[in-house]
Image: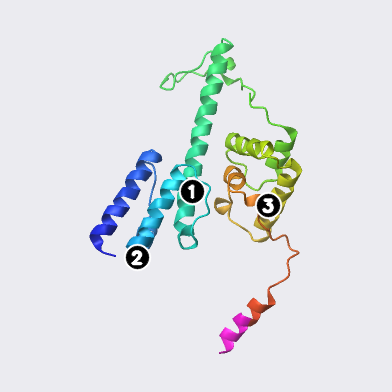
Amino acid sequence: MGVAPFYYVWSSVLVLLSGAMKGTAVISADWIAMVGLMDDATAGRLFKQMLAIMNGSDAEDPADLKMILSFIRRFRADQEERDAELSDLRRQAALMRWHGESVAPADNKDPSPAPKQREKKVKSVIPYSSEFEEFWRVYPKRKGKVKAREAWQRLLDGGFESSYLISKATEYAKECDLKHVDERYIKRPQGWLNDGRFDDDFFTGTVQANLDAITDGLDSIFD
């Protein structure tokens, strides 16, 4: 792939990231090096898939682009979580004002201790069902609860059974435990639900080894 065509494609990608993700994306040298080896067609598919991600598409990522797209999806999920948490803080502040409680300004530089009433916590106003709370308890990564609950409700409205989702989340947690998956690589509950990952087959310690694969591996060693 020529230097100039790649430069313009990758520049467009960075512009999209900075616009859609508020300019906080950090692209490491490893990712840039990877994209630098792509031909025009592959870079074009990457660009197209990134547009789909930013538009909320749940389409399956192409196999050869999964690694770099998973980085982008993880960052987007982090951004959505931060937005949800900020929204919760604003909602709590509004409730405190409604009940006549004072709220310290964000730029308050007064070093004196805050009055006791400022420490009062506002109870969550989001109606979490007992079934969702059970799902949240067994899922191996409890991040982004508000968005996860929205994805959960969409699935229930679409006819899925809560017991099935809880069972599959338990299997996924078991697989992550058996494979010692680092938490940063565990799917966030919102994405896990939205992507239909609950229909995957998870390793829970009962799957037999693939003897054909093992035999092929031994043959390659002794060739």
Q: Is residue 29 visible?
A: no
Q: Which residue is mark 2?
A: 37
Per the model, the C-alpha gap separating discs 3 and 2 is 36 Å
Viewer-nearest of discs 3 and 2: 2
Residue reaching furthest to the front: 158
Residue 153 appears at what percent x and percent y? 65, 35
Name the residue at 51% across, 16% down: 103
Viewer-nearest of discs 1 and 3: 1
Q: Is residue 52 visible?
A: yes
**Which quadrant holds the N terminus?**
bottom left
Residue 101 appears at what percent x and percent y? 56, 12
- Amino acid type of the residue tagged 3 in the rendering: Ala
Say few, some or many: other residues with alpha carbon within 10 Å of mark 1 (under 14 / 14 to 19 / 20 or more).
Answer: some
- Amino acid type of the residue tagged 1 in the rendering: Arg
**Which quadrant holds the C terminus?**
bottom right
Closest to the observer: 95 or 135? 135
What secondary structure characterizes most of the magenta part? helix
Left or right, residue 28 beside residue 64: left
Residue 178 picture quarter: bottom right
Q: Is residue 127 above or below residue 211?
A: above
Q: Which residue is mark 1?
A: 73
Residue 145 appears at what percent x and percent y? 61, 36
- Give the residues in magenta: 216-223
Left or right, residue 82 beside residue 125: left
Q: Which residue is mark 3?
A: 173
The reply to whether the C-beta atoms of the residues labelled 2 and 1 are less than 8 Å apart is no
Closest to the observer: 65 or 89? 65
Residue 172 appears at what percent x and percent y? 67, 53
Per the model, the C-alpha gap separating discs 1 and 3 is 20 Å
- Amino acid type of the residue tagged 2 in the rendering: Leu
